[in-house]
Amino acid sequence: MIFEQLALDVIYLSIHADFRAPLEPLRARRNPHVCFAVYGVLKKRAATGALESLAVEATIILPVTLGYLVWLEFVGRATFGHAGWSTTLLLIAAGPATAVPLLFFAGAVRRIPLTYLGLLQYLTPSVQFVLGVFVFGESMPPGRLAGFVLIWTALAIFTGETLHHLRKLHREALRLAG
């Protein structure tokens, strides 16, 4: 029941977002949370450690990345080494800034249930919402606000139901033990 509600909330929010085409919300580039969820499930089922799986991922993407960088250099649009030391240092720092959180994610996904991981993934958009509206004064159309409220209401119900179930299991375990 709760997953259907969450799906409807996401669809509602997607429809009321400012997209150019009605089907655009369904595209993966507009729904990185779907890609990240699939990535989390694959990480959870992988029989390798966090570092090993990240090394395999990097090895798979390396030829494409190198090809793109060579092409950028060839057409004169490369930035690395051409746009000053500050930009070059930022580009160098982008590697660890990307790899370290992915390494932490890969380690965490093996240790905690995916339901907890899924709830944690709602923190980033919520922090962005608070910063955007209250710090930077961005507008919040009623449709987007309604979608946001619907999603967080569903998450609160899901969390409450999970906590109730855990308490019930704990009471049952205590009853059987005592």
Image (cartoon, grey):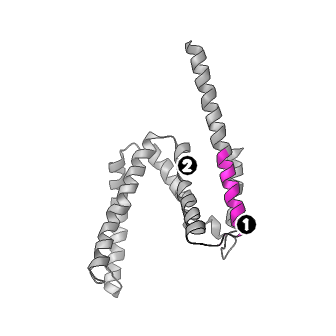
- Judge the density around disc 2: few (<14), some (14-19), many (≥20) Cα neighbours within 10 Å: some
In the rendered image, which quarter is residue 91 located in?
Answer: bottom left
For the N terminus, give its image quadrant: top right
Residue appearing at x 57%, y 58% in the figure: 126
The segment highlighted magenta reads 137-156
Which dot, 2 or 1, sits closer to the camera? 1
Q: Is residue 20 left or right of residue 79?
A: right
Q: CA distance from mark 2 to mark 1?
A: 24 Å
In this view, 85 is above or below 116: below
Q: Verify whether residue 144 appears in magenta.
A: yes
Position in image of residue 50 (x %, y %): 36, 48
Q: Which mark is residue 118?
A: 2
Identified by mark 2, the residue type is: Gly
Q: Is residue 102 visible?
A: yes
Q: Are marks 2 and 1 in contact (CB under 8 Å)?
A: no
Q: Which mark is residue 143?
A: 1
Residue appearing at x 55%, y 63% in the figure: 128
